[in-house]
Image (spheres, rainbow, N blue to C red):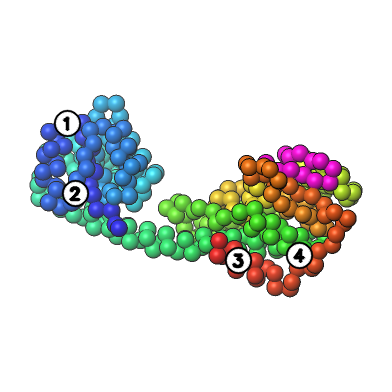
Amino acid sequence: MSPDKILFVDDEPMALKYFERLVTPLAPVITAISVEQGKAILRERGDEIAVLVSDQRMPGARGNELLGYAREFHPGIVRMLTTAYSELGEAIEAINSGEIYRYITKPWDLGSLHADLRNALELAKLRSERDHLAREKLLVQQQQLLGSRLAGLTMLAGTVRGDSSAALHRYARTAVAAGCRVPATPWHKWDHAGLLQAEARRGIAIARDLERWQAEFGDDRTPERAFSQLAQALGAQARGASVHLPSAAALTALLDAAPGQLPQAAETAWLAWLLWWSAPVQVQPTAGNKAGGWTLQAPAGGAAEPAPPADWLERMIEDLAEI
């Protein structure tokens, strides 16, 4: 449902009653008597509010502060400032800084007030429709993000020595088993181009980390040393040829981190190690650990595993799209 309410903020009770009486025929009115109360209403009911009208001069904080807050956290709300004639300089400054759509001078002229608010409500409706379409588009992209990231990791891993296909197959299977989820995308902060740019930067950072880890792990692949290195890279504990993780975060972070979040070194270590180790690994929840711990260990007796099917990536991307 589109927002349809007007929030009016003024420290004068009579102004609140007068505004509500004049404007209620146009739209439902919510009132607040201070900047802090206005912020609280925005936090609780921001999705209902189409237009915010704030007085400028109030005790404690000025209207510009509230309008700036709304601009940052509720950019779809049309913001307006009401001022006395003597405060027009502050209103013009607010317009120039992008904090408000327009100002309304006091005392109000009923005809002008209604016209300005009707225009603001129409603009809010257009913004809501635009944001809905943008959100739908980004939700589709968000749903495809896990598969896109896995495909990107596959390309990056292809530059690393060893059987990258088997290692990526192990990584993807483990991520799904460990509860990988589609990352939430704050749709009002991202557009298509911004999301692509953020993902490109993320890919560059991952590539650099993969290369660095390969050099750091060295050439000694004896199981105890290999798992000791993995534990050190992940900040976990090693017990012989096994590593115990307190949570699954390190197993899924390259796929389900929030957009725009560059990977930490420990988050790339698991994939880098799989590429370097280039041998089977058993991954399973740690027995008796109710906090969600996981154990990584070498298979008993050096057991082999079948090669991944030729279409494993296609299947896994389809599986990720359904998460």
**In x, y percent, where is residue 259?**
55, 52
Amino acid type for the residue under numbered disc 2:
Pro
Real-space CA distance between mark 2 and mark 3, rounded to the nearest whole angstrom: 46 Å
| Quadrant placement of the C terminus | bottom right
Amino acid type for the residue under numbered disc 1:
Glu
Up-down relation of residue 322 to residue 63 (above or below): below
Real-space CA distance between mark 3 and mark 4, rounded to the nearest whole angstrom: 17 Å
Quadrant in the picture for residue 64: top left
Query: 172 or 66, which is in the foreground?
Result: 172
Q: Nearer the viewer, mark 3 or mark 4?
A: 3
**Residue underneath mark 4:** 165
User: Does the magenta portion include 95?
Assistant: no
For label 2, the crowd category at 10 Å Cα-Cα, with few meaning under 14, some 14 to 19 and many 20 or more, is few
Amino acid type for the residue under numbered disc 4:
Ser
Q: Is there a contact, CB below 8 Å, between mark 2 and mark 1?
A: no
Q: Secondary structure at mark 3?
A: helix
Q: Would residue 117 appear left or right of 258 to someone viewing this image?
A: left
State which region is magenta.
233-247
Q: Is there a contact, CB below 8 Å, between mark 2 and mark 3?
A: no
Q: Would residue 130 appear left or right of 114 to someone viewing this image?
A: right
Up-down relation of residue 240 to residue 129 (above or below): above
